[in-house]
């Protein structure tokens, strides 16, 4: 039985080895077939390329129009390459704002308005009374506090008299020490009450003063959205109830995209246009915010501008911030720059030794682009004749003439 098992095991191993060998042979065969197919395709591709070249040569010999086109002169327009000061601006929209804008609010909890002493558009001074709030309850509290104060003063005067009498008796060895100490403690207790009540009267008097609402700046009452009988809290669902604007110090505010954060700094030149007021102002950046707004993905920049009676807060301002400048730069119209698979290029006119002029393709490296112009970093020199019209269909070496 053991012999039979050994024979079966040997036979099984032999069959497995033969199967593996057949599988490996099959894989090697498939690989060789694919290699052979690839070599055949390569040979066909090479033959096809050779056939194309042969046909192109035969066509060139037979097609007389091709040579005629090759010698055809194309009319173009040219202009000399010059240098100039190049500037790049960030074009933004902002608004005029005032340096001093005050949103008036009550010193206390606010209250019902009893009198309004200001109108929209009125000039007010710092400290001027604007509103009178209801103060009836506070006045009653003051009366009650003062009455309590007078009562404590009367009690204190009586207690001091008792203490002095008790002390005189004690000096004559009459009475007990307990009576003297009790009289003294009563005086001290009333003195403490008096001081506390006096402070309370001061606090209530100060609360009474909060019923008077004053302006904290000089300026124009830009908004007065409060009437007698309404509750004054400083702000309502419609905005500030009283807004005072001081236009003697103005500024222009704008939001700058965050990708310009490294290109601006305090002192950057700014050109400001106020279209509605027909004003143009040159200024500099006076403030750059230190954080990026998470919703607008930008930062705030401000530029102070001189006082102008025609300018009002929230007027639209067109802002141009200078963020790049280059002196004596080669500048050309951006539409003259073309692009191929390797580089950007322009066409220039070149005069050959035989007197003919041809188009030369020159690769260029561009810098900043602003408006219709582009700065050329490399590839062009002042004095070269750049082709400005007719460049779209030119090719390298084509004969040209200026019109």
Image (cartoon, rainbow, N blue to C red):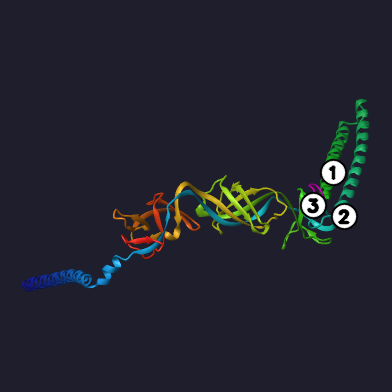
Using a 10 Å C-alpha cutoff, classify the residue at mark 2 as few (fewer than 14 neighbours), some (14 to 19) or many (20 or more): few
Q: Nearer the viewer, mark 2 or mark 3?
A: 3
Q: How far from the left and from the top, in percent, is residue 351?
A: 33, 54
Was residue 19 drawn as part of the magenta stretch in this picture? Answer: no
Was residue 125 drawn as part of the magenta stretch in this picture? Answer: yes
Q: How far from the left and from the top, in percent, is residue 358?
A: 33, 58
Q: How far from the left and from the top, in percent, is residue 375?
A: 45, 52
Q: Of marks 2 and 3, which one's residue comes earlier in the chain?
A: 3
Whole-angstrom CA distance, mark 3 to mark 1, is 41 Å
Q: Which residue is mark 2?
A: 136
Q: Is residue 109 left or right of residue 86?
A: right
Q: Nearer the viewer, residue 387 or 94?
A: 387
Q: How far from the left and from the top, in percent, is residue 272?
A: 61, 53
Helix, strand or loop under label 2: helix
Q: Nearer the viewer, mark 2 or mark 1?
A: 2
Q: Residue at x 53, y 48 (%)?
A: 264
Question: Range of the magenta residues?
Answer: 122-128
Q: Which disc is residue 197 wearing?
A: 1
Helix, strand or loop under label 1: helix
Q: Residue at x 25, y 71 (%)?
A: 64
Whole-angstrom CA distance, mark 2 to mark 3, is 30 Å
Using a 10 Å C-alpha cutoff, classify the residue at mark 1 as few (fewer than 14 neighbours), some (14 to 19) or many (20 or more): some
Whole-angstrom CA distance, mark 2 to mark 1, is 20 Å
Q: Is residue 145 left or right of residue 51?
A: right
Helix, strand or loop under label 3: strand
Q: Which residue is mark 3?
A: 123
């Amino acid at each position: 039985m053991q012999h039979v098992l050994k024979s079966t095991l040997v036979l099984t191993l032999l069959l497995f080895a033969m199967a593996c060998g057949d599988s490996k042979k099959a894989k090697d065969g498939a690989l060789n077939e694919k290699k052979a197919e690839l070599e055949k395709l390569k040979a066909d591709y090479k033959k096809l390329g050779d056939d194309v070249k042969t046909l192109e040569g035969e066509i060139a010999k037979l097609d007389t129009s091709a040579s005629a086109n090759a010698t055809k002169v194309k009319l173009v327009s040219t202009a000399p390459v010059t240098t100039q000061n190049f500037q790049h601006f960030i074009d933004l929209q902002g608004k005029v704002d005032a340096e001093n804008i005050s949103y008036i609010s009550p010193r206390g909890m606010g209250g019902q308005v009893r009198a309004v002493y200001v109108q929209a558009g009125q000039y007010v001074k710092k400290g001027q009374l604007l509103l009178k709030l209801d103060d009836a309850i506070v006045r009653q509290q003051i009366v009650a506090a003062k009455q309590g104060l007078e009562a404590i003063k009367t009690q204190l005067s009586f207690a001091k008299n008792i203490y002095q009498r008790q002390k005189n008796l004690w000096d004559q060895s009459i009475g007990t020490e307990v009576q003297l100490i009790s009289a003294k403690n009563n005086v001290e207790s009333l003195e403490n009450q008096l001081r506390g009540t006096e402070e309370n009267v001061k606090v209530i008097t100060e609360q009474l003063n909060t019923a008077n609402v004053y302006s904290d700046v000089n300026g124009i009452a830009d908004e007065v959205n409060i009437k007698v009988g309404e509750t004054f809290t400083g702000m309502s669902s419609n905005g500030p109830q009283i807004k005072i604007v001081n236009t003697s110090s103005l500024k222009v505010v704008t939001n700058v995209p965050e990708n310009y954060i490294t290109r601006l700094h305090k002192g950057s030149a700014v050109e400001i246009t106020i279209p509605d007021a027909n004003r143009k102002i040159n200024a500099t950046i006076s403030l750059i915010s230190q954080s990026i707004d998470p919703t607008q993905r930008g930062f705030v920049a401000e530029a102070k501008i001189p006082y102008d009676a025609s300018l009002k807060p929230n007027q639209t301002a067109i802002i141009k911030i200078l963020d790049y400048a280059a002196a004596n730069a080669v500048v050309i119209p951006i539409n003259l720059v073309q692009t191929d698979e390797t580089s950007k290029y322009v066409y220039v006119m070149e005069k050959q030794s035989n007197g003919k002029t041809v188009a030369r393709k020159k690769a260029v490296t561009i810098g900043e682009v602003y408006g219709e112009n582009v700065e050329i970093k490399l590839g062009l020199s002042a004095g070269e004749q750049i082709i400005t019209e007719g460049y779209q269909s030119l090719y390298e070496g084509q004969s040209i003439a200026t019109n």
